[in-house]
Every structure is written in C-alpha cells, then in structure tokens.
Image: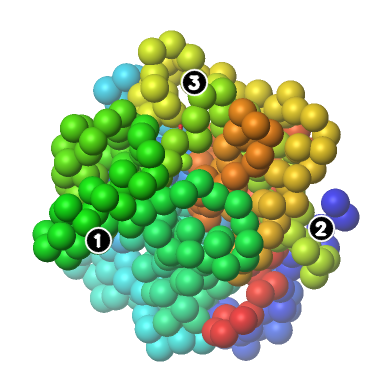
Amino acid sequence: MSDPSPAAVPAPAPADEPGSSSVRKPRVAVLFGGRSSEHAISCVTAGSVLESIDREKYEVVPIGIAKDGRWVLESGDTDRLAISGPDKLPEVDSSLPVLSIAQDGGAGAMVVHEPGDVPHALGHVDVVFPVLHGPFGEDGTIQGLFEIADVRYVGSGVLASSVGMDKHYMKVVFEAAGLPQLPYAVVTDRQWRTDPAGCRAAVEALGYPVFVKPCRGGSSIGISKVASAAELDDAIEEARRWDPKVVVEASSGDGAREIECGVLESLEDAGPDTSVVAEITVEGDHDFYDFAAKYLPEENTRLDVPAELEDTVAQEVRRLSAVAFEALSCEGLARVDFFLLADGRVVLNEINTMPGFTPTSMFPRMWAATGVPYPELVDRLLQLALRRRTGLR
Ligand SMILES: Nc1ncnc2c1ncn2[C@@H]1O[C@H](COP(=O)(O)OP(=O)(O)O)[C@@H](O)[C@H]1O
Ligand SMILES: [Mg+2]
C-alpha cells in the first residue's frame, strides 16, 4: 500500500469564501442514521468514523438522517453516538436544524433551514461519506440523489449498490462472470400468487434443506432454514413479510465453513486490493449466522482473522472477491462472503457494498490484519471518493 497523496483539493471558490484561490481542506459530510432498521448501528459507526477522520487534512460536517427521514445538522458529539446501555441505543435528534440538498448540480450545496431564520447555504461539500446500511442507504437510492446533485460520495454507485442489495440480480451478475454459487430459485410475487405449485416444484429440484430469504434484506432478517416441503410455505410467507420477491437456495451442507474477504479499490488505478480472509463460526444452538448471532454480544460467534486455511484456498477466495467486485463495477469498498464446502469447493454467498464498519466489525478487522488500520481505511475511502469524477464513470 503506497503512502496516500495529500488530500488537499484546489478550492473551487466556494460560496463561503468568495474569490478564494487558495488550497483548502476538503469538506467531508458524514451522513448517518437513516430510515432502515440499522439506524442505531449506523450512528455507532458514524461515531468511530468521526473520531478517526484526520482533522488536519479534512473539515468534517456531521449530518444525521432521523428515523422520520428528516436530514439534520448534527453536533458530531461522538459520546452521544455510542451505545450507553442495553436500552440506550443512539438516535439522530430530529429537532435539530433541518437540511436539504439542492439539485442544481455543481456546487454540491446543502441548505440549512433553522427555525425562524432564512434558509442559508451550508457551503460546499466536497464528499459525502454515507455510513448507512440497508434500504435507502446501501441500495442505490441515496447514491442516485448524490448523482443528481453532482456530489462525490464514498462507495459504490447506483448500479452496484442496487445489484448488491438484490440477492436475485446479484446471482445473475455473478453467474455471468463465471463465479461459483449454490443452486437457487427465485419466487416472485406474481409467481407465488398465480403458480405456487410451480414455485414448490422449483424448490423441490434444489433438494432439502434450503434457505429461504427476502431478496432485498440484510442482517439475516426474514431468513429461514427449511428442512422439508412441509415447512416451505410458512418460510416463503415469512420472507414475503420483508420483500415480495424471495430467493430460495440449496444449503451449503454439513461441514461447510463461512469465509469473508474485504475488497478496496486501488489508489493506483490497478485492480482491487483484497484483505486477508476471515472465518465466522457460529456456536451454541444457532442453526446459522442469524440476527442474534450477528448482533447480540452474549451469543457465541467466533471471528477468526485471519482464518486458518490452506494458502491456496485463501488465495482463491481473494481472487474470487476481486472478480466479484469488478463484476458489479463496485467502487470504494465491499465485503464478499463465501462458503467453503466440505468437498473443498469455494462458492460465493453474497457481496455487501457498505459492510459493517465499526472498529470491531469484520471488514475493518480484516483490513487491520492486512496492515491498514481504521484511520487509514477511512482516509483511503475519502481519497478514492474525492478523486473520482461525478456523472458517468
Ligand atoms: N445457502 C446457504 N447454506 C447455508 N447457510 C446459509 C445459506 N444461505 C444463508 N445461510 C446462512 O444465513 C446467513 C445469512 O444469509 P445471507 O444470505 O448472508 O443474508 P444477509 O444478507 O441477511 O446477511 C449466512 O451468513 C449463513 O449463516
Ligand atoms: Mg450475509
């Protein structure tokens, strides 16, 4: 990894400094919270990101998205963003001054609306770091808003974000790239309503057990492991509570291991860099890496960074991760998840375009073990976003 070049950018005569031609620090808007179920975890991540950004190099503007969808100017008080007790999850304060994003392009202007005051420009924002997970944060929708407003942002663009969120189209793209996956069937809303027998037959062909998943989900929410045909309808209905489109997958089988790999776009205009490979082992009475195993601290989930694997297997996982990243035209970062089957085959499970990003999350831990500590990771993502052009790339 080469030393990052200075991140200072030529000042484009921002609204708050008329006529300025000096070099100023890039202004970073850290955007967090959001409408998805991962609001609190996003606040916690934002706390770590805000603490890690080098203030000598960057000026930082914290922006919260309240649960009601309102954008507000946050204080950036990182204590307030930590989890302060079992029932004290952090939340964006929707009573703060409201922000809107102008769609006139070029300036990247954000407008602040304070009660009893005339709306005023927040000033130029050079780059947004959307620390958001799930729908409306990681699925291309907010990325589309940034594109319209001509604002640079960290991470993947509209297409990679939305394909990465959709477990059906993700598989279509992986298949086209020749990447190994488990057999699957898609159950669309119409197919389930008009031809449930056909849907059941398609699943039967996969062989039980199967995994039934909401197509555009995350955090294992709505996923069931189904042992027999008798349980299938209930599992499909459960997945449909979250998403009318459902994906059913053959199981990775007994003795399979769950392996993950981090990917970062290169600063040198080369192919993507990959991290050491890690393993998740779910212990206790969990059937799989479900919501409780992922997030409840008392649950027994072991993370091995790096994983104990033969070198050739780890190399193959890294190679496939880079291919998956390129197949979706990802930008910035991604985490690619695999199963290592009992017969030694490596198959892809999924790609996450905005992986968990607290210092204890898998993605930062894999990069720390590869020699990229958390602050450097944040800096690299900002540099990558600052140097890319807006519009079609
Ligand atoms: N085909 C499968 N075979 C075995 N386990 C699976 C399979 N699909 C999912 N799982 C288990 O369910 C977990 C969540 O599934 P995943 O597809 O990664 O959804 P999410 O996007 O919610 O993380 C996985 O980490 C794994 O433990
Ligand atoms: Mg997953």
Q: Amino acid at mark 3?
A: Val
| Label 1 within 8 A of ligand 1 by Cβ | no
Q: Give the mark, 1 or 3, whose residue is nearer the N terminus.
A: 1
Q: Nearer the viewer, mark 3 or mark 2?
A: 3
Q: Nearer the viewer, mark 2 or mark 1?
A: 1
Query: Crowding at label 2, few (<14), some or many (≥20) Cα neighbours within 10 Å?
Result: few
Residue drawn at x 40%, y 59% as measured from the top left: 168
Mark 2–mark 1 distance (CA, rounded to whole Å): 46 Å
| Label 3 within 8 A of ligand 1 by Cβ | yes
On screen, residue 15 above or below 303: below
Image position of 356 (left or right of 272) = left
Residue drawn at x 23%, y 36% as measured from the top left: 229
Mark 3–mark 2 distance (CA, rounded to whole Å): 37 Å
Residue located beneath label 1 in the image: 188
Identify the mark at residue 4; answer none if there is no mark. Answer: 2
Tell me where residue 185 appears, x and y as whole percent: 36, 54
Q: Give the mark, 3 or 2, whose residue is nearer the N terminus.
A: 2
- Please, what secondary structure does the residue beneath circle 1 have? loop
Identify the mark at residue 282; answer none if there is no mark. Answer: 3
